[in-house]
Image (spheres, rainbow, N blue to C red):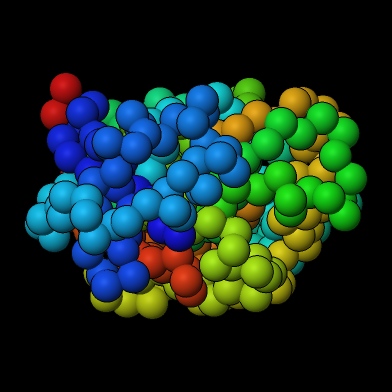
Amino acid sequence: MKLLRFGNKGSEKPAVLHSDGTIRDVSSLVQDFTPETISSALTRILGSADLNSLPEVPASVRIGAPISRTGHFIAIGLNYVDHAEESGMPVPDEPVVFSKAPSSLSGPDDDVMLPKDSVKTDWEVELAVVIGERCDYINKEDALSAVFGYAICNDVSEREYQAERGGQWIKGKSAPTFGPLGPWIVTTDEIPDPQNLDMFLDVNDERRQTGNTRTMIFTVAEIVSYLSRFMVLEPGDVITTGTPPGVGLGMKPQVYLKAGDEMRLGIAGLGEQHQRVVTRQS
């Protein structure tokens, strides 16, 4: 099942992508997709619904982030060996954990705004995990049972803020629009193996990143279990799991985003995102 939200920013409604390719408004069944409603009960309700009887959403409508908000927006850094190498960083022995501000969450096709005075804004296609059950010291063997679904995340990053301004990486990861998510959350029954998904990212129709989640250093199950040792994961939390090589930071010479650039990125079974880079106006 593919869950999404549509409408103007701040007033989105929940929907499901029907098997016939139409988008169906499910706001008569659930008020919104939120941390309070993300659960196995939600999938049962939506799975038993007669989607043909529900209103069809125009194909031209804006698609928002597939969840209204998230408590934790957690990221895993350097989770592909070749990305760690291109970044000039050692391959980690344990997951590198940082956060993105929840306010960075945005729709999959919304414009990406360059922060004021940004000089090194970069791209990162990543597999995102949406938690469906409370996790507190969960075993690796049970970890995938706590996952609600998967989505695409573009972990947009301002490298100067991240690495040259002191403090934590969160400063370079958290600007508004730096967390495009979606276009939908794909429930786990449609993605039986999250460790074999092809992924790509293009900038201005030029391929920058090509990878597959099988080359992750730490698997989804390992990441969920690991994080649950240090914090309680709750329904609606989002974990973005690292990026394959091909980011601007690793190019020689380095290349970063500028106003007018366009990004297209996708992961097998999870759809695609398209973003235009713009200058922040206020």
Image check: 156 left or right of 78? left
Q: Quadrant of residue 198?
A: bottom right
User: How far from the left and from the top, in percent, is residue 227?
Assistant: 78, 37
User: How far from the left and from the top, in percent, is residue 205?
Assistant: 27, 75
Residue 213 showing in the rendered view: no
Image check: 211 left or right of 55? right
The residue shown at (28%, 29%) is: 116
- 208 in relation to 274, above or below: below
The residue shown at (87%, 54%) is: 141
Foreground of the two, 149 or 15: 15
The residue shown at (71%, 45%) is: 146
Image check: 47 left or right of 183? right
- Quadrant where the C terminus is found in the figure: top left
Image check: 179 left or right of 60? right
Foreground of the two, 190 or 280: 190
The residue shown at (16%, 55%) is: 56
- Quadrant where the N terminus is found in the figure: bottom left
Residue 8 showing in the rendered view: yes
Count of numbered tags = 0
User: How far from the left and from the top, in percent, is residue 26?
Assistant: 29, 43
- 266 in relation to 107, above or below: below
User: How far from the left and from the top, in percent, is residue 18?
Assistant: 31, 63
